[in-house]
Image: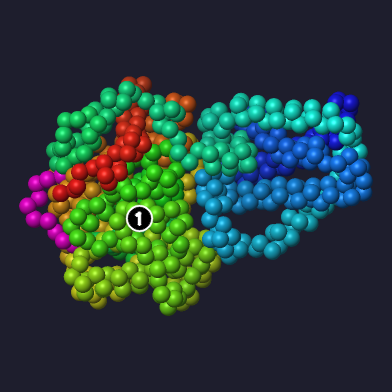
Amino acid sequence: MRHFFRSVPARLALLAFGVFFAVSLLSRLVLLSAARHEITWDASILGVFAIGAWYDAAFGVFAALPWLLLGVLAPRRFCNARVGMLAVLGLMTVFVGTLIFITTAEWFFWDEFGARFNFIAVDYLLWTQEVLRNIYQSYPMVPILAGIVALACSLVWLMRRAGWLAWAVGGSTCWHARCAWALAGGMLAALVVGLVSQASLPAFANQYHGELAKNGCWSFFAAAKQMELDYEKWYLKLPREQALAEARQLLATPNETATSQAVGDLHRSITGHPTEHRWNVILVCMESLSSDYMSYLGNPLGITPNLDRLATDSVFFDSLYATGTRTVRGMEALTLNLPPTPGQAIIYRPAGTHLVTTFTPFLERGYDCAFFYGGDGRFDFMNRYFATSGCRIMDVNAWAKPDVTFKTSWGACDEDLFNKTIAEADAAHAAGQPFHFFCMTTSNHRPYDFPAGRIDLPSHSGRDAAVKYSDWAVGNLLAEARKRPWFKDTLFIFSADHCASSAGKTEIDVTKYRIPVLLYNPALVPAKRLTALCSQIDVMPTVFGLLNWNYDTLSYGHDLLAPSAAALPGRAFVSNYQKIALLREAGIAILKPNREASAFACDRNSGGFSALAPAAAAKLVHDTTVFYQSASWLFSSGGLKMDANQPVR
């Protein structure tokens, strides 16, 4: 072995590989400690480390390649000279510091999301300005960075004292060995690309084990590559015409009839309302507002007094589930009313433009439609999506400077957002134009800062305080709106985008998807509590029902106040990028890449899974396949594009 690694390229690559492998093992141990209360302490932990070592070694090949190339390309005299030693010393310090920084970042990411680097981390890299400000406002970055630099310098100093660096640069520099190792490195990297993939990660009973088995760097690049997963390539499927025909049957209700007999046409017609209402509609999508913050699920802290009070005067969905774990996924559910297709949300994808959305019926009736956001709406491509849906963009870049009184890295505070919304509503009303506004809040997001003096909890003291401030802002919005002449004709929708946390022990922990939704204006709609299991995609179809609108739709959601709604089976769609699921009263079916599927009885209160009768499991998996395969086809085939659809009546 000593003769095998005589050349400088081989020794530099081996040293870099060893450092990477050791730091990756340390990272897994650190995350294991962070997840000690969630993991299952049994023999499967050994599997976690065995599989983790495989992924660490695979990515270690790529971490070692730059060092291999350095040894191949460096001049012979450079390698053995003092300047060569100093260069390697400096580069190794940067290399080790970078690995320690990644490990530290993984720890904070895990603390926030309970997962290795994924799509969220990819987003954060793309939107560096907002994220860096948020990080500096949320964490003591100067001491953290100083500690990373000090630790990296100390470790490289120890490596030098041990003679490892001198050993690496003191090898042979003959040209034929360099060429041989360059060829071997390229072939090994190609072999890793061909044989190792994130999709081949074995399933663990505890989801945390699966996350721990990953390598963070590999996971990051896999997420960057797999923005969208081809449903028909990766997931369980039926013959396409069968899936579409059965989807038509599952979606049809007495109130929603097919507009044609064509198998590939999923349009349904909502008719029978003699008089349409021309109410204004303001939809407030609230950042990370889990149901368990409110008193109806037993929260004793009293941090949502306004929303708790509004719930008793609203059409209140108390068993409604978000479709995903990201803001754009919640926006997708509220505006497209589709099950969450695998991969990134449609809003994020390049093809997610010029689609028929819930704004279409409003625009056809002459409404002013606008998207309000206190931050930069270019983040996650929100502006692109809403603009091509026919909305005016009213993110913070479109506001006057005095409109912003308090701002964090993620955007203006919620009360600034609502004040801007009221001002635009005043203008639309003065022009005699009805309006539909979509407002996205930011205050319930790290760094959890908000203006002083609004609530009895201090700013920057945690999520509970941020939730209470967001609730205060809702109360203030309605107090100001009641002073306006347009209030009596305005329906308010308050909906979370997703829960504050999505990590869980099971494949999909349904307790991390339950969110509150309220439709409020007692002068327009009587209070009613809807207890049936339902989905975020049902919100706007129910609103259209309250408006008595006749329209055509591609929505997979239903009007839960329609006369036929009582006969509909309760169901919700939930997802976490690669895993997509259908939740019913009988249980949950989960579809996974490589055409895998599982079904369980599910306790929605605890999130626990148990065995489900084979016949019931097969039926649930079948229906889940029909829903997701047809929805994925509808988007990928261009069926959601404006020019592919007839005008809405």
Most common SS among magenta residues:
loop
Left or right of 226 on screen, residue 150: right
Q: Looking at the image, which residue is at 29% across and 56% down? A: 390
Look at the image and say whether residue 274 sits in the magenta stretch: yes
Q: Position of residue 321 (x, y in %)?
A: 35, 46
Viewer-nearest residue: 504 or 274: 274
Name the image quarter holding residue 118: top right
Name the image quarter holding residue 139: bottom right
Viewer-nearest residue: 351 or 576: 351
Q: Which residues are magenta?
A: 270-280
Q: Position of residue 79 (x, y in %)?
A: 88, 42
Q: Position of residue 630 (x, y in %)?
A: 31, 33
Q: Looking at the image, which residue is at 71% across and 39% down? A: 63
Left or right of 485 on screen, residue 380: right
- SS of the residue under disc 1: helix
212 in relation to 86, above or below: above
Q: Amino acid at mark 1?
A: Phe
The answer to whether residue 56 shows anywhere in this view is no
Q: Looking at the image, which residue is at 61% across and 38% down? A: 218
The answer to whether residue 108 shows anywhere in this view is yes
Q: Position of residue 123 (x, y in %)?
A: 52, 50
Name the image quarter holding residue 136: bottom right
Left or right of 502 on screen, residue 12: right
Residue placed under numbered mark 1 in the picture: 386
The 10 Å Cα crowd at callout 1, few under 14, some 14 to 19, many 20 or more, is: many
